[in-house]
Every structure is written in structure tokens, then in C-alpha cells.
Amino acid sequence: MNLQIQRSGDRYFADLGWLKTRLSFSFADYYDPENVNWGALRVFNDDRIAAATGFPPHPHRDMEILTYVFSGQLEHRDSMGNHGVVTAGGVQFMSAGTGVRHSEFNASTSEPLHLAQMWVLPGKIGVKPSYGQIDFTEADRRDRWLNVASGRRSIDAPIALTQDAALRVSQLNDTSLQHDFEDGRKGFLFVAEGEVGANGQTLGEGDAARIAGGGPLKLEGRGEIVIWDLPDM
């Protein structure tokens, strides 16, 4: 197994005043033809959004979009008539399909919002768009894997993906976990906070690792982690 470590300070950083974001892959004004995706993972943005601000209505199509809230309150509205607020530990998910417009705002007038915005290339295109959200508790992910989303037969999760990919999260408290990757798969690990060892390499807040090759990924330490198991594309 090979781990390519991407330190928080080495990721592309944009400060728009209301939004401070670190991008793992090409997105918006940042374009690098050598850094467009990692397997089926097309976007992984670490966003911090100021109080009472956010993204105005904008379109998407043929993409599976998941937003994981680390802290704060995320408010969503879309052209399908959906409206909801997702709080810390919760996930908003949208299959853009044939096309949808939506907005995302910090629902708080005083507190910042911290989230990960993730896009996965779909396994099917031209499908009817859909939206949902799920609230999870810290107990759901404390010192264990919480399966959030999956299109893999081997991993059951409450959010279904059309892509052969899976999203898991955990809150480690001086403990250890392992995820086994099959040969030919790719992985993406993100540390939202804390300090976590990954196969002997130390990752801190905002660091990520791109994983290639099969075998076990052994994690230990203290912090909130996000991991993707992905097909190579």
C-alpha cells in the first residue's frame, strides 16, 4: 500500500472573506490538469463559512454530492422544493442527475460553519435528481466506523450511491481502527481535527492521504476522520 500525504498547508487555499476553503482537487478558479480527481472522487473541499453567508443558488448535474458537517448549521434549499438544516455530525446528500439548482448557507447568525463538500462521479447518469439528509450522533461514530454512504455490496450504509464507492467516518479517542482495501482500489483519508497515525505516518488537522494498492490501513490516535473507498478511474 502506498500513501501520498497532502499536508493542509500544501492544498490550494482560497480566502473570499465569507469563505475560507482548502481544495484537494481542481475546483472553480483552481485548475491543475494533473490534479482533477482521485479515482471516482472528484471534489473534496474543506470549507469554513462565516455566519449568515453561503453559496447562492447554482446548478449541478450528473454528480453525487455529499456534505459532512463538522461543526455549525448548514441550511439547504433546492429547485425540487427541499429545505433542511443539517447540524454537526449530519450529512446532506444529493444526486444531481438530470439537473438541479440549490443553495447552501450558514444557518447561524453568529457561529461559523465547518464542513467537507465531496463530489463523487456517478455510476449512472441521466437519473432523476434526489435529495436527503441524515443526522448522526457522536456516539454513532465514536471509536468505530460509521458507514455513511455506499454503492458497494460489501458495505451497507443508509445513503445509497450509484457509484462503487463508500464513505465512512469515525471519531477516534486514543484508539485504533482498520480499513482493508481490495487490490485495484483507491482510498482517500482526511483528518478534520486531531492527530492520527496512518500506517505509521502522522497526519494532523487538515491533512489528507491518497491511498493506492490493496491491504490494511491501520489508524490510531485522536481525531475526526473521513475515509473514501473508491474505484480507480
Image: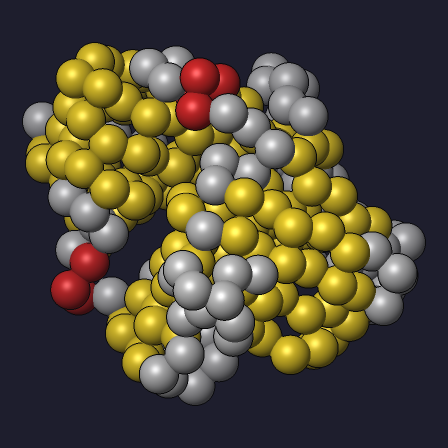
Q: Is residue 58 visible?
A: yes
Image-based side of 82 in relation to 229, left or right: right
* Nearest to the observer: residue 50 or residue 128: 50
- In which quadrant of the rendered image does the N terminus lie? top left
**Where, by quadrant of the figure, is residue 22 drawn?**
bottom left
| Residue 185 against residue 75 in the figure, above or below | above
Res 151 visible: no
Residue 52 or 151: which is nearer the viewer?
A: 52
Residue 167's spot in the image, x, y percent?
Answer: 51, 34
Q: Is residue 139 above or below residue 109?
A: above
What residue appears at the point 32 percent right and 79 percent down from the top-left corner? 14
The picture places residue 200, in percent across and down from the top left corner, at 9, 27
Q: Residue at x 60, y 46 (%)?
A: 86
Looking at the image, which is closer to me, 208 or 210? 208
Question: Which residue is at the front of the view, 90 or 145?
Answer: 90
Please count the marks in the image.
0
Residue 216 position within the rendered picture, expressed as x and y whole percent measured from the top left = 29, 18
Residue shown at the point (14%, 35%) measured from the top left: 195
